Image: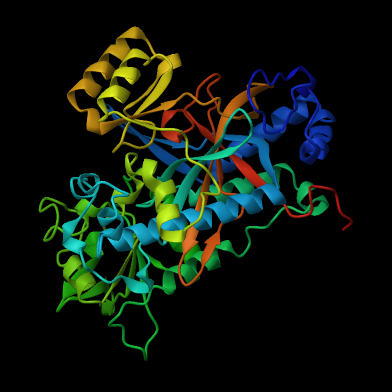
Amino acid sequence: MLKQYETGLFYDEMMKANGTPKRHYQWFYELVENFSENELREKHETAQLNFLRKGITFTVYSQAGGTERTMPFDFVPIIIPKPQWHKIEEGMKQRLKALNHFLEDIYHDQEIIKAGVVPRDLVENNPYYYKQVQGLDVPLRNHVFLAGVDLIRDENGEYRVLEDNLRNPSGMSYVFQNRYVMRQVYPELFFQHSIETLEHQLSELQQTVMSHVPKQSEGNRSLTAVLLTPGMYNSAYYDHVFLAQQMGIELVEGRDLVVKNDVVYMKTIRGLKRVDIIYRRIDDDFLDPEAFRPDSALGVDGLLRAYKAGNVSILNGIGNGVADDKAMYVYVPEMIRFYLDEEPIIPNVETYFLSNPERMDYVLEHLDELVVKNVGASGGYDMLIGPQSSEEERELFREKIIEKPNQYIAQPTIKLSRAPAYQDGRFYPCHVDLRVFVMNGEKTHVLPGGLSRVALKEGSLVVNSSQGGGGKDTWILSEGGEPHAK
């Protein structure tokens, strides 16, 4: 069935333009070609049923309320040869090192602002810049314990960074569940090929969490870490439950914690138990009603005081949003040059600031060709994809841009790479991206593979699950993809 597949004018992860598979996909291509139509349908159904049975879900919010859905899954993997993956790993470590330097700097000496590399107003007028944590010394001087960096490939197959997620990146649980499901669909492949395992990655995450020892911790007792969730109605709640279970830490809500004498305690049936490290999945504004939004019912009164006193670590750090803002994204290559004296290993996508009048005029004249994004939005919301938009949608964005030019950026419509997907009994090309997870503690570690997201709606460029996207397993070939004897 793949013989009828056409790559079109896009870079394809699996197929060459002449209709033959790339070398690292050859064995997978031959395997699929030997399946009957019934066998392919069975594999597709096996994958969907596994997600349903394991309750692997996310929530889509609309005006009508929240709807819980199973994650759509495609059984054609994204396969990355080891040399390509090595470049991604090095690029991610470099980028996160620079971003962490930036966060430490802007909350302390602000050298990058004094040097004129990043404009002061872009930092200090940013809604995600929190003066409440200025001058605060965080454990390991590490603001980003877990990052999710979104990569795309352009028409030449070059990886580019599309977005940095440094606040509460979600989706790590799906990486592990995608692998579990693929083992059910293709059990034979994991014995015949050298695919990098995910086996010890969750213990790596747990060790990274535990390495953030608060300054005032008592050295003679074992530390207690918790995962703080907004609760079961949050869209990423499955992610929270899975990670807490796998790391062996308690899953708590704000009402389960209390601060006494600037120390955080967890309520248990045996009384109060001291908490040292909080992996929080609650946004900054809702963390502490005393310090941020007084109407928050999700946070813990006095948490910031305990943090400032050095009695608890909060991961990811408060105020990280200033560094993953879509406007700040433009300056990350300059951060790499400023802090590390290196050239970026993985480049950005070209980006236009609309606060520049000339750029804004150009963008307004070419809305049908560009992608326009709200600098503060995520999940595919408040975004215009010019070539796929109507005149009415473009007019709406024209008004938004003119009213608040600082709130938007624009990018060329990149010919996102595609890969085969199998849905509704056939293979067809779908756009894909890759969320790479980077863990930062005493050392930096990149999760092998990450979350490949796929725009399953034919022709769509939006990969977010909330907008109809799905997932694929990501395989890193440790021996070039050739079968080995076992």
Q: Splitting the image into 4 quarters, where does residue 303 fall?
A: bottom left
- Residue occupying the far front of the picture: 115
Rendering coords of residue 87 (x, y %): 62, 51
Is residue 206 among the parts visible in the rendering?
Answer: yes
Q: Nearer the viewer, residue 375 or 195?
A: 375
- Residue occupying the far bottom of the picture: 220
Q: How is the image coloured?
A: rainbow
Rendering coords of residue 298 (x, y %): 21, 54
Q: Splitting the image into 4 quarters, where does residue 221 fall?
A: bottom left
Relative to 388, is 114 on the left or the right? Answer: left
Q: Quadrant of the N terminus?
A: top right
Rendering coords of residue 202 (x, y %): 54, 63
Residue at x 47%, y 35% (from the top left corner): 349
Q: Nearer the viewer, residue 297 or 478?
A: 478
From what the image shows, is residue 241 above or below residue 325? Answer: below
Rendering coords of residue 169 (x, y %): 41, 50
Residue at x 55%, y 25% (from the top left corner): 415
Q: Nearer the viewer, residue 258 or 270?
A: 258
From what the image shows, is residue 91 above or below residue 69? Answer: below
Relative to 104, is 260 on the left or the right? Answer: left
Q: How many marks?
A: 0
